[in-house]
Amino acid sequence: MGVDLFEITVNLVKMIFIFVMMVNAVPLLVWVERRGSAFIQNRYGPNRVGPLGLVQLLADAVKFIFKEEFVPGKGHRLVFYLAPVVALIPGALAFAAIPLSMPIELGEFSQIPLGLFTIDLGETYGPYRFAFQGYEIGIGIVFVLGVSSLAAYALLMAGWGSANKYSLYGALRASAQTISYELALGLSLVGILLLFNTFNFKEIVEIQSQALTFSFLGSQMTVPYLPNWGIIYQPVGAIIFFAAMFAETNRLPFDLPEAEAELVAGYHTEYGGIKMNMFYIGEYGHMLVASALMVTFYFGGYTLYPFFTPETVNQFWSETMGLTGNPVALLSSLSLHLVFMVKLVIFLWVFIHVRWTLPRFRYDQLMDLGWKTMLPWALANTILTAVVILIMRAAWS
Amino acid sequence: MLGAAIPFYILSFLVLFFAYKTITSPNPIHCALHLAITMINLAFIFFGLNSPFIGGVQLVVYAGAVMVLFVMVLMLFDLKTEVRAFSRGLFSSFLKVASSGFLAGILIVGVLMSTDMLDVTSDSVGVGVKATSSTDIALLLFNQYVFAFEVLGLLLLLVAVGAVAVSRIPGGTHAND
Amino acid sequence: MPMTEAFLNVGLNHYLILSALLFTMGMIGVLMRKNVIVILMGIELMLNAVNLSFISFSSYSGNLNGQIMVFFVMTIAAAEAAVGLALAVAIYKRYKEINIRFFEQLRG
Amino acid sequence: MTELIPVFALTGFVILFGLALVFATSLLGPKTKQSKVKQLAYECGLEGEGADSTKVPVKFYLTAILFILFDIEIIFMYPWALAYKDFIATGRGLFIFSSMAVFLAIFIFGLFWEIRSKALEWE
């Protein structure tokens, strides 16, 4: 985790910062969702409290905390209380494993320049290397898949702990749905693995930060001005992945578990106040993870090839702006982070827009789509990728 | 040294504690949830033992699939907390626990006595062991164990067919009420 | 202090002892519980204990065959759990009973 | 094991955060008298028997079983995909492709058998 106190502190603060970022994204996304749905449906949405209704979020948060505590009489208290806590874990752990920018490589330093004056630290620190993510795990993809498959427990615990038939039925539906779509999700990633041959997110992003390069019948081809993004090789895989991620987050058009007309509110029927809000944090955290994975696998991660790659950004800050040393590392990392955030926000908006565009499936249609359409298509995608790679490389190598 | 020891002891405490809860909780659903936590902790122990891929598979397969199936099946049954969760008979239970404890004792003493004979004493901790990459596992799997791999595919197919066939056995949670 | 040394120097022994204890717990669960599904859980515990010893040997000797074996064991364990649960559900649907004692009386 | 410490730290932090939120409401929220009627499950106003007695279709557990089996097959494809180009580079591309082709043939046969046998049919 670190060799000295400075590094350990930075790593801890960074981790907590990423978690807090996830938690704070929730009210913002809820606001965007409400305003966005109002925009789509030609309404106003929340616009009374504060500018553009932004303070509404704060009011909601305060209201959530001051709600009355309630446990259904026949419920299983401990399980009922723990379910929302468990709901937070998968999103947080998965999001912290995704690189949000390139690592910051700090050289040795003994003072911190702050514009006009500098702080003298007295002794020399460094060199350090801080990854721009909660923690670096070598087998990132399998870790994220494994951690997000734990989300089913929160649903099942909530459904069973409430001792309510709507809740239990909603929980069973939700978990059956998440596990069904996990198959298509996992299978669509095989195409990405075939292309990039690594489980590591950072390496995947680095491969995508170059010009479009592939071997064509044994010879190396390069297309300048086009990025080496996964979407170019794996359009079908990307669509399947994105659709499966919708189902994993239990959002419309896949929000059968809380279909109001049939199941009241599904597995969080008995939940109110901050406990229900924690389920929402889990759901929006899943959305963040889904968008971040989409960006990382198919859209170049924190790079945008001709303009923003680790090299060009470094060059910009050091040569064009005339900086040297640690500020270059810091600023280039931050600017790549900005690129990542822009892409992330685009996908989050797609999530919200789809919710207010498509109608809900029926449950049998949902399961049919998962097992009989998406799984065969993902299989076909995998086989096609393997055959193409074999033809393009094998006979001519 | 301490950096490796503290996570190990925390994890093994959690593993043993939740394994204990698994076999003693009267409510089967609690058993399943405790077992799921045990599996997750074991996955992290595997991560720590330089086998991150197996740890990830443990998370995906055991914690994410098998235990979810257990929990779902238990919710399917209308199981009240078992009044008598354990099999009866004071003497036979004592015999069972005693023989299991005896086995554990033999195992521990055997481990303590025999690992000195192996070439892998505690001195070589983390020194000679290189971090194994997942690609190495893949190469080994498809070089030496291809046949076993295909047979496993066939086994999984048979299990799928068998499970569907067994689920067709008449009767039903709906039917009999 | 050799005792604290042995305690803090986490090595193969520690993992093997953990595995032995885990195996024993699974075994006690299998022997003592009456619920078939909990017995299946005990079996899963025992299999996991064996996996742990495989992995620790593999890791401390640098031999990857152990990890492959664990991969296979996991597969078979999952298949076993699937079939076991399917059978338990089938018997439960027929007789409304999942006590292991009752299973002894099932004939042909 | 040291590289896992951040994961544990984050897990611990998230759990503490969640528990703190849950306890915050029980401290700050209004305390009103709990009555039997109030504690009824949100169903139809009749006293429920608890979720334990709910009858749910066996389909759910069948789906879960089939999920486990297919999930393992997919997990087996991950190391294959990881080593695919390595095998091709050493000139054994056809071998690795055909070994997976056999496996996939079994997989696809299984999938279509499940579909044809109506095991995945939700009415």
Image: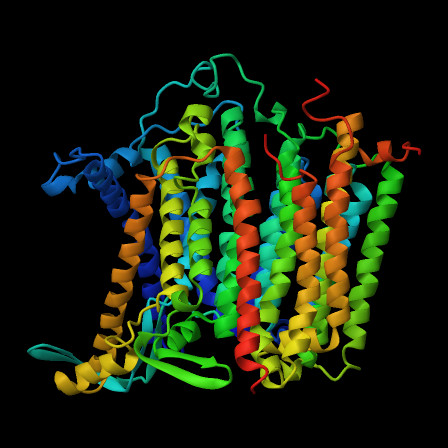
Residue A306 spot, x, y in % from top left: 26, 77
Q: Is residue A275 visible?
A: yes
Instruction: Name the image quarter holding residue A273.
Output: top left
Is B32 above or below relative to B140? Answer: above
Residue A178 or residue D40, whichever sits in front: A178
User: Residue A147 in the image: x percent, y percent?
Assistant: 50, 56
**Count of all numbered marks drawn on residues in the image:** 0
Closest to the observer, A273 or A336: A336
Question: What x and y, as percent, mark residue A280?
Answer: 37, 41
- Observer-nearest of D114 and B48: D114
Report whether residue A76 is seen. Answer: no
Identify the residue shown where x is 57% and y is 23%. D50
Question: As drawn, is A325 to the left or to the right of B141?
Answer: left
Quadrant hosting residue C4: bottom right
Q: Is residue A267 above or below residue B123?
A: above
Q: Quadrant of the C terminus of chain A?
A: bottom right
Q: What is the x, y in percent for residue B141?
A: 69, 73
Left or right: A93, with A124 as reference point: right
| A324 relative position to C50: left or right | left
Its colouring scheme is rainbow
Q: Which residue is most to the top?
A: D46
B68 vs A307, left or right, is: right
Residue A333, relative to residue B84: is it above or below? Answer: below
User: Relative to A97, does residue D26 appear above or below in the rendering?
Assistant: above
Q: Residue furthest right?
A: C108
Which quarter of the rendering shows the N terminus of chain A? bottom left
Residue drawn where x is 50% and y is 82% of the image: A217
